[in-house]
Image (cartoon, rainbow, N blue to C red):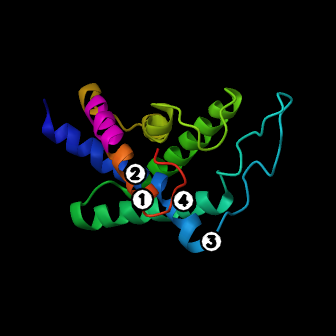
Amino acid sequence: MDIGGIVETLIYIAPAMAANGAPVVGSRILYGPGHPIDMGLTLPDGRRLLGDGKTFEGFIFGMTIGVAAGLLLLALLDKPPITASILSSAGALAGDIIGSFIKRRMGLERGVQAPLLDQLDFYIGALATLWLAGYRFDPASIIIVALVILVLHVATNRLAYLLGLKSVPW
C-alpha cells in the first residue's frame, strides 16, 4: 500500500469534499433555500430535472469553500495547484448534480436515501474532472479514498442532522 499515493489523492480531493459539504451549511446558515438550478423544470416523466436541493447559491458557495480549502492546502503543503482545486470543486458539484438527476429519473424524491450514489457522486465527478485535465491517481489510492469518503460522509451527515442542518441523517 502506497501511503504517499493515498495522501496525494486525499489532498487533491479535499477541495471536492469541502465543496460538496458547503451548500448544506450555507443554505441553513447564510442564504436560505436559494434558487433552484433547474428553475422548476419538469421533464416529460413528470419529475423535476433536479429538484429544489440544487441551487445557484449552493453551487457558488460550494465553489467558494472548495477553492478556499484548496488555497489553504496550497499555502500549507504547496499543493494542489489552484487549477486542480477549481476542477476538483467544480467536478464534485457537477457529480452531485448528476446524482440528483439520476435520483429523480429513478423516481426518488429529495431526501430519499440512495446508497453509494449519495456518498460517491461528488467523488466520481471530482475524479473524472481531474482525470480529464490530466491528473492521475493510482487505482488502489482511489479505492481507499473512496472507503474513507464513505465513512466520513456517513459521519458528517449524521453530525449535520444532529445539528439541525439536514432533515435526514444521510
Q: Are marks 4 and 3 in contact (CB under 8 Å)?
A: no
The location of residue 84, given as percent across then percent down, is 41, 50
Mark 4 or 1, closer to the camera: 1
The location of residue 113, given as percent across then percent down, is 53, 36
Q: Looking at the image, is 141 positioned above or below residue 7?
A: above
Is residue 38 visible in the rendered image? The answer is yes
The residue under label 3 is 31
Label 2: how many residues lie within 10 Å, few (<14), some (14-19) or many (20+)? some
Label 1: how many residues lie within 10 Å, few (<14), some (14-19) or many (20+)? few
The residue closer to the viewer here, 12 or 23, is 23
Q: Quadrant of residue 140?
A: top left
The residue under label 1 is 162
Q: Are marks 1 and 2 in contact (CB under 8 Å)?
A: yes
**Amino acid residing under circle 1:** Leu
Q: CA distance from mark 3 to mark 1?
A: 20 Å
Q: Is residue 137 left or right of residue 166?
A: left
Q: Which contiguous range is marked in magenta?
A: 142-151
Q: Are marks 3 and 2 in contact (CB under 8 Å)?
A: no
Q: CA distance from mark 3 to mark 2?
A: 22 Å
Q: Which mark is residue 23?
A: 4
Q: In what element is the residue under mark 2?
A: helix
Q: CA distance from mark 2 to mark 4?
A: 16 Å
**Amino acid residing under circle 4:** Pro
Residue at (28, 40) in percent of width and height: 148
**Amino acid residing under circle 3:** Tyr
Q: In what element is the residue under mark 1?
A: helix
| Sequence-first tag of 2 and 4 | 4
Q: Is residue 92 left or right of residue 152?
A: right
The residue under label 2 is 158
Q: CA distance from mark 4 to mark 1?
A: 17 Å
**Amino acid residing under circle 2:** Arg
